[in-house]
Amino acid sequence: MSKKEADTHRAVEQTDLQILDNAITAHEGLGGFLYRTRYILGEIGKLEKHYRDTKASIAVTEQQRDQINAQLEGAKTALAKVQAQEVEKRQAVAELDREIKQKEQLLTHYSQTIDRITGAAA
């Protein structure tokens, strides 16, 4: 062996092993960090999907609410019309009742008059 070869080859020392042990420890720490980061990002992705789905669900629910409110307003309008018609019909019935009473009174008066005439003639 030449002197040059002897200089390039050296014995493995304890510091070399320590350097490798430190690198392995650092690599394990980095691997754990990367695994935890991957897990966290996966959970964030699930949460983002859940958020988007919830947001879309809320939009659908709001649209349904608007449709139901429109139907409710239509029903309220129809109810108001029916109530107004009911008032008109009640007034018409009351007017007819007054007319009936007037006619009954007139018939009673005619009947009494006829009774007096026929009674006086008999």
Image: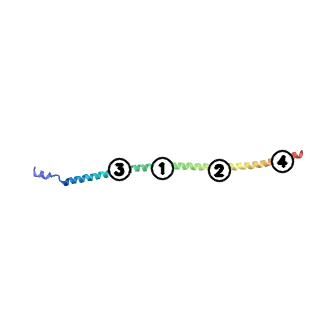
State the residue in front, 3 or 30: 30
Taking the view exactly as shown, the residue that stands out farthest to the left is: 2
Residue for point 19% across, 54% down: 14
Q: To which residue does mark 4 refer?
A: 112
Identity, as a three-letter code, of the amino acid under mark 1: Ala
Decide: few, some or many residues near mark 2? Use Cα within 10 Å; few <14, some 14-19, many ≥20: few
Residue for point 50% across, 49% down: 63
Determine the CA span between mark 4 and mark 1.
78 Å
Could you say whether the residue bearing mark 4 is in a helix, strand or loop?
helix
Decide: few, some or many residues near mark 4? Use Cα within 10 Å; few <14, some 14-19, many ≥20: few
Mark 2–mark 1 CB contact (< 8 Å): no
Identity, as a three-letter code, of the amino acid under mark 2: Ala
Q: Position of residue 55 (x, y in %)?
A: 45, 50
Label 2 or label 3, whichever comes before in sequence order = 3
Q: Is residue 11 left or right of residue 82?
A: left
Residue for point 28% across, 51% down: 28
Q: Is residue 49 left or right of residue 79?
A: left
Q: To which residue does mark 2 refer?
A: 84
- Quarter of the image with the C terminus is top right
- For residue 33, the mark is none
Determine the CA span between mark 4 and mark 3.
106 Å
Label 1 or label 3, whichever comes before in sequence order = 3
Label 4 or label 1, whichever comes before in sequence order = 1
Could you say whether the residue bearing mark 1 is in a helix, strand or loop?
helix
Label 4 or label 3, whichever comes before in sequence order = 3
Mark 4–mark 2 CB contact (< 8 Å): no
Q: In this view, does 105 lie to the left or right of 68?
A: right
- For residue 39, the mark is 3
